Amino acid sequence: MNRRQLIQSAGLIGVSALLPNLAFAAEIDTSDLQSITGAVVPIGREERAGRLAKAQELMRRHGIAAVLIEPGSSLIYFTGVRWSRSERLTAAVLPVKGEPLVVTPFFEKPSVEESLGIPAELRVWQEDESPIALIAAWLKERRLDRGTIGIEETVRFFASDGLARALPGARIVSANPVVRGCRMVKTPTEIALMQKAADVTVAAYRWTVPRIREGMTPQEIGAMMNAATTKLGGRPEFALVLLGEAAAYPHGTGKPQRVREGEVVLMDCGCTVEGYQSDISRTFVPGRASPDVWRIWSLVAEGQRIALRTARIGTPAGAVDDAVRAFYEREGLGPRYKLPGLSHRTGHGIGMDGHEPVNLVHGETTPLAPGMCFSNEPGIYLPGRFGVRLEDCFHMTAEGPRWFSEPPASLDRPV
């Protein structure tokens, strides 16, 4: 579950920031801003062809004959098709050789074709027919029905179970070695889109933070951030604003909040550019901050630096979390996930989704490799008082990690 879904499902104050007061938003003057995304290069057919070739290479390596994918980020990634899930199945099948199959209801065919970004066979099913039977027949035609069928990890049970029943001679397995093997390692085009998304979010912070005034609500601040993001050319994904004690709880509280001088303001905001995400958090204090806030902010800033120093090619992803947590424990926080301290993982993968595999969390053995992208957010939370989270994302290069956004210089210079 990503941050937007967590906030919405919990019914927390962040929902109001995600869906800001429309009347207030209409009054926000962003005439001094202009789009900075006009020159971005979207994902094209050549890039998607390379993705399919890599997926098929991984399928051969892992003995997988075909991969089933439902609508969502993975379907967009491989086919370009942007579609919503419903009880009427639209899906793609990537074969180990040849062009993919896309199945969709008959009456949806023209709409699906609009965003199809690769050569593929498109088959339709009528309302009284089974899309699973259509997929099974296609696999039988290609003599893949007795092979190993990979299921993308977000595919719903009715689809995977239905295919298993329709193909009793097939072996059903996870498609993670193929799908994760492709999506976890970003290409230069993907990195460039993520960089631009980060640039938009940083620019929106620079515009928004100086305009925050005492007495403002999270909804008002979130509306300003989202308005700036939109004008700068990004698509707002979330603008979580936590004030005072609410900052002690990573995804907030339902209690009323207003900006007060001397109290913490924690903002966690992100957008997409051509489908690729940013995720940046800043913590600051209007007016004079207490020595306790300065100390915790400085510890979190050092935690970020430790995480970045630890992130090296070949290092297990979990080692990054371990290094930060060991430092915090030496400072009397924790231990492990206990509070006051760091109650969540140090970071998560990021790309088309705000949260992607794998995480920077204890026990994760996946080695870091060039092209992998992560958030770096080792927050510290003091229940009943305040919390501090600084979050910037980085991508791995052959020479080591590289920031998408530079961390803030100090508590009183958040952007």
Image: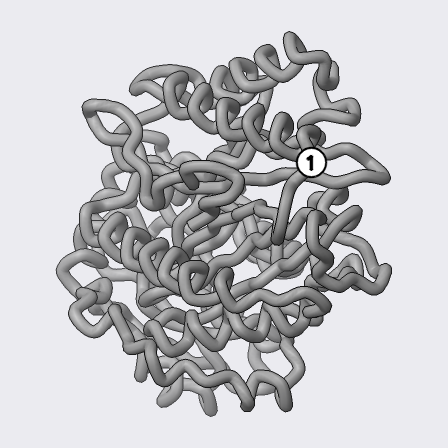
Evaluate whether residue 103 shows in this view: no
- Residue extending furthest front? 288
Q: Is residue 151 left or right of residue 266?
A: left
Q: Is residue 68 left or right of residue 339?
A: left
Q: Where does label 1 land, which residue?
A: 290
Q: Residue at x 47, y 28 (%)?
A: 304
User: Vertical placement of 101 versus 49: above or below?
Assistant: below
Q: Residue at x 53, y 39 (%)?
A: 411
Query: Label 1 amino acid?
Result: Ser
User: Vertical placement of 406 versus 367: above or below?
Assistant: below
Residue 44: where, in percent of width, then height? 19, 65
Q: How many marks?
A: 1
Q: Residues within 10 Å of mark 1 (few under 14, many from 20)?
A: few
Evaluate whether residue 224 shows in this view: yes
Residue 78: where, in percent of width, then height? 32, 58
In front of the other: 320 or 139: 320
- Residue extending furthest left? 46
In front of the other: 413 or 399: 413
Element under disc 1: loop
In front of the other: 239 or 5: 239
Report the colour scheme. one colour
The quadrant in which residue 316 appears is: top left
Q: Residue at x 50, y 41 (%)?
A: 391
In front of the other: 103 or 234: 234
Residue 13: where, in percent of width, then height? 75, 63
Q: Is residue 178 left or right of residue 399?
A: right
Q: Residue at x 18, y 56 (%)?
A: 47
The quadrant in which residue 327 appears is: top right
User: Vertical placement of 228 versus 206: above or below?
Assistant: below
